[in-house]
Image (cartoon, rainbow, N blue to C red):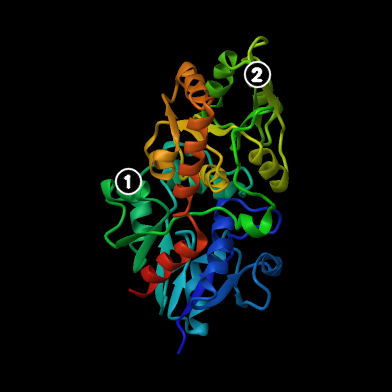
Amino acid sequence: MPKTVYFDARYIRVDHHDGISRFSVGLIEALMPMVEVVAIISDHRQLDKLPSGIKHVFLNDPTSWLEVFAAMRLNKYRPQIVYSPMQTIGSMGRKFSLVLTLHDLIYYRHPKPPPSLPLAVRLGWRLYHLTYWPQRLVLNRADSVVTVSQTTKELMLNHRLTKKRIDVVYNAAGDLDSEYEHKPPAMRPRSNQNLVYMGSFMDYKNVETLIKGMSDLPGYRLNLLSSISQDRLEQLQSLVSPTGGEVVFHNGVSEAKYHEVLSSAVALVTASRDEGFGIPLVEAMVRGIPVVVSDIQIFKEIGGQAATYFETDSSTSFSDAVRSLENPVVWSEKSKLALLHSAQFSWTKSATSLVNALFQ
């Protein structure tokens, strides 16, 4: 009899993917050849993001008050194992094995909730992240816990967040071979000296260091791709040097446009002081694009020897790191290392790790 996993797919967005949504879809697609997958959905439009014909059951929206009774409602399907890519699924009265996910601890250090959440949920979010004991209660309800990096696993152990086993299931990028036409670069770009930043403009992302560093990089263009508020735009534009490299605020691009710009880049760059994972690093490395990143632990894990590191708050260190790749031989070596290192971040490998975690 085939192994069956009930996968909590209710965090799949019906408009465009965020991190949890992409994680869910990527894992489900890779899991299906390995085990029988039953998707738990809360909106039938979520099926449009999933493989055609996938088995599914319907449950309440995870932000609904009915979430308290989620496990009791799932009991009627007699699942053996339920896996959730979040840690908040209701577990009261469950009659099945439950594996939860804690992606990172970044919201304890930066507790501002996503603005898309309802007001009551945002208030609860802030209260939840004031101390660690609610997280311990939540995680200890499970039979085991998954996280997406060794860095976060170590933090969870340091903060004694759970008594249960913790398994690492890496995040990964989209299947670029099927989604985008691309091939690894044969050589360093000679004409447009594009640097690419993909991420938000929250304070801890430290975009200021990138912009200030452009004053020492004439001839380069820093492409800031994400959407940005008018106030934040004006604040950052005031830092742009008129004699340095060009700084372009794209204010949001399509995923296809993002990968088009990335494919022609000299490097992907980020000066973040803190990060949960670093998907843009993987998206760049899998294309053979070098990454120039701040020297923080999670980037050391994700970038390894393929990345070029700089002092987090030093604009001079950043510009020096970019210039270190101007030698075509050095750039090509970093490109090859990026491709090699990125091979560990695939949905197939992640799904294999998840299956091992669920059935050991």
Q: Quadrant of residue 198?
A: top right
Check the picture and name the quadrant holding the N terminus: bottom left
Q: Quadrant of residue 214?
A: top right
Dot 2 amino acid type: Gly
Asked whether disc 2 touches disc 1, contact meaning CB atoms under 8 Å apart, the reply is no
Q: At numbered mark 2, what does the secondary structure look like: helix, strand or loop?
A: loop
User: Residue at left 59%, top 21%?
Assistant: 211
Q: Position of residue 224 (x, y in %)?
A: 65, 31
Q: Tell me the residue that label 1 is attached to.
A: 155
Q: Which residue of the protein is positioned furthest toward the top in this rendering?
A: 243
Q: Tell me the residue that label 2 is attached to.
A: 219
The answer to whether residue 126 shows anywhere in this view is no
Q: Position of residue 183 (x, y in %)?
A: 63, 49
The one nearer the camera, 277 or 300, is 300
- Above or below residue 147? Residue 297 is above
Dot 1 amino acid type: Leu
User: Residue at left 63%, top 15%?
Assistant: 218
Q: Which residue of the protein is positioned furthest toward the bottom in this rendering?
A: 1
Q: At numbered mark 1, what does the secondary structure look like: helix, strand or loop?
A: helix
Q: Position of residue 89 (x, y in %)?
A: 48, 64
- Above or below residue 164? Residue 248 is above
Check the picture and name the quadrant holding the C terminus: bottom left
Disc 2 to disc 1, C-alpha distance: 41 Å
The one nearer the camera, 274 or 97, is 274
Nearest-to-viewer mark from 2 and 1 = 2
- How would you rate the neighbour count of disc 1 (Cα within 10 Å): few for under 14, some for 14-19, many for 20 or more? few
User: Residue at left 43%, top 25%?
Assistant: 312
The answer to whether residue 68 shows anywhere in this view is yes
Q: Position of residue 108 (x, y in %)?
A: 41, 41
- Above or below residue 337? Residue 70 is below
- How would you rate the neighbour count of disc 2 (Cα within 10 Å): few for under 14, some for 14-19, many for 20 or more? some
